[in-house]
Structures are given as C-alpha cells and as structure tokens.
Amino acid sequence: MRLYSVHLVNDPGTKEDRLTLELLDAIERRSDVSQRHLARQMGVALGLANSYLRRCAKKGLVKIREAPANRYLYYLTPKGFAEKARLTARFLSTSLTFYRQAGDSCDEVYTLCDANGWKRLILCGLSDFAEIAFVRALESPVNIVSVFDRDSRRKQFFSILVCSDWQALPGCDAYLITDLVNPLSRYHWLAHRVEKERLLIPSVLGIEGAVTTKGHD
C-alpha cells in the first residue's frame, strides 16, 4: 500500500521522484518493458514517460540496449539501483510518518464524535487514508456505515458499501473527509449538501485554514 500525504502528492519535486521510482521499479522487474507499459505503470502520457526514461538514461540510472525487431531493452545501472533504494527509503519513511499522523487525526475526530453522540459516520473519498480511518474506527465508539466516492466503481470497501450516488447513501450522523487527492474540493462539494458542522476534517489533511479563509460556499 502506497501512502503519500496530501501535501506530498501535490508537491512537484516529490511527484518527480515518485514517477522516477515507479519507472526504475518497472525496469528492474522487466528489462524488455515497452514504453507504453512504462506509461501505464507511471500513470502518465506516453510522451512524458519517454521524457523520464531519457532523463534517467542521461543521469546514468538506466542503460538502453537495442534489441531485434526495433525493440529496446532497459537495465538499471549500479547508480540506478542505488537511486531506487534511496527513493524507496524516502517514501517508506514518509509513509510510516503519514500513517502515524493519519491514525492520530482519526482518533481526534472519533473523540469529538463520541462527545457529540455521533455514532454513524460516512467516509468521503476512497484512499489509503480511508483504510486507516476504517481500521481506527474498529477501536472506537463510532461505526463506519458507508464510503461515498462519486468517481469510484467499487461496490464494497472491507465489509461496507461504497456509493457513487449521493441519493443512495444510508443515514448518518457525520461525514469524514478521507480524500487525499483534492480534499478541499471534496469538502466544498459536501458543504452545499449537508450541515457544515457535521463535516469532519482530519488535521492530517491540513485544509482547516483554507476552509476558514475561503469560506464554505
């Protein structure tokens, strides 16, 4: 499971390192990988994948050899293996830190829910953070009754229902933002549909100030 905090996902430098790591990982797994496969692995357009590949080759991280039938083989150099190890360690450290922070922020939210007598929560956004929120809820007085994600085609998350249709959601006491891609946008969408007091923002997302500054509408 990959864990990138919302700040890291949107940081250009971190994004570049993440894409480099995914490219190096794909090449280590399969030397005859195609550029189209690399693009799918990285989640980017073919042209951008090619750009990263050439950049890694120029840095001495990847060695390219021509193969029959106008194909190419890609190999990690010793420098490439070292860079992959460095980036892996960096993101692992980030993941563990984020996991702890996410868990603590969930505990804070669930303590607030308990104080308000809110027992039934809906998670808003399928993500690694939603998994953390679900697991932490098992040790709290609250009950996660569903996950709402307009862009998801999944029907189930652990043992609970995933809804992409707002009208199909079960009744609940509050909504917990668990979107890691654009939590502020998710908040504003929900703020037009439910009481803002029942929209819970975990501190790890770091959007409280933006919500206060920009207002709810």
Image (spheres, rainbow, N blue to C red):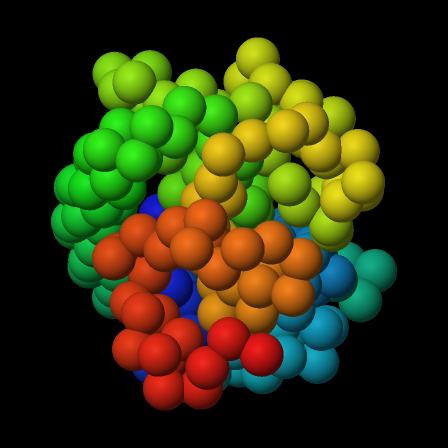
> Measured from the top left, where is residue 60 in percent x and y?
34, 76
Q: Residue at x 57, y 63 (%)?
A: 191
- As drawn, is 30 to the left or to the right of 67? left
Residue 149 position (above or below residue 193): above
> Measured from the top left, where is residue 127 in percent x and y?
50, 44
Q: Residue at x 30, y 18 (%)?
A: 141
Pick the residue in front: 83 or 96. 96
Q: Is residue 22 visible?
A: no
> Measured from the top left, where is residue 217 in percent x and y?
58, 79
Pick the residue in front: 72 or 33. 33
Residue 181 position (above or below residue 101): below
Q: Quadrant of the N terminus?
A: top left
Q: Is residue 179 visible?
A: yes
Q: Residue at x 74, y 51 (%)?
A: 151
Pick the residue in front: 199 or 184. 199
> Measured from the top left, where is residue 113 in percent x and y?
31, 35
